[in-house]
Image (cartoon, rainbow, N blue to C red):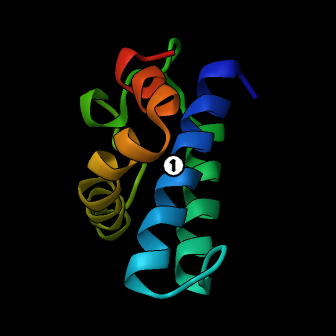
């Protein structure tokens, strides 16, 4: 797996942990959030774009509409909180490293 994909997956996993803990009391992740992480990992692994853009900017939509909405929900909640709890990870994500 390429570095950018691994970094993106790590960021998503941390976001899911923040979200799941608040929304579902999951520690580390409930079954639904684990399913979303596994789905995302598979989508990232199979991404046909090189170099890989941010999913929101990609012309190819790999995620199903339902899963895309679930990821958006997680990011809306966890994005601002990630900046406070994991500032280096959040900065790396924003800068695209």
Neighbourhood count class around disc 1 (C-alpha, 10 Å): few under 14, some 14–19, many 20 upward: many
Please state if 73 lies on the left or on the right of 28 as rendered. Answer: left
In-front residue for pair 10/52: 10
Vertical side of 57 occupied by 75: above or below:
below
What residue is at 25 percent from the left and 28 percent from the top?
57
> How far across and how far down the image is residue 79, in percent?
32, 47
Count of residue discs:
1
Please state if 80 lies on the left or on the right of 4 as rendered. Answer: left
> How far across and how far down the image is residue 48, in percent?
53, 27
In-front residue for pair 7/40: 7
What residue is at 51 percent from the left and 31 percent from the top?
89
Name the secondary structure under disc 1: helix
Vertical side of 96 occupied by 65: above or below:
below
In-front residue for pair 63/93: 93
Name, please, the residue furthest toward the right: 1
> How far across and how far down the image is residue 49, in percent?
48, 21
Name, please, the residue furthest toward the front: 84
What residue is at 71 percent from the left and 21 percent from the top?
2
Please state if 84 lies on the left or on the right of 46 as rendered. Answer: left
When asked about the image quadrant of residue 1, the answer is: top right
Residue assigned mark 1: 12
What residue is at 35 percent from the left and 24 percent from the top?
94
Please state if 27 lies on the left or on the right of 93 as rendered. Answer: right
Vertical side of 21 occupied by 14: above or below:
above
């Amino acid at each position: 797996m390429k570095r950018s994909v691994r970094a993106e997956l790590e960021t998503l996993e941390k976001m899911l942990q923040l979200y799941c803990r608040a929304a579902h009391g999951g520690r580390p992740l409930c079954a639904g959030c684990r399913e979303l992480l596994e789905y995302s990992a598979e989508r990232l692994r199979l991404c046909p774009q090189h170099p890989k853009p941010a999913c929101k900017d990609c012309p190819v939509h790999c995620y199903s509409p339902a899963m895309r909405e679930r990821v958006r929900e997680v990011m809306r909640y966890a994005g601002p909180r990630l900046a406070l709890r994991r500032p280096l990870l959040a900065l790396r994500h924003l800068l695209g490293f």
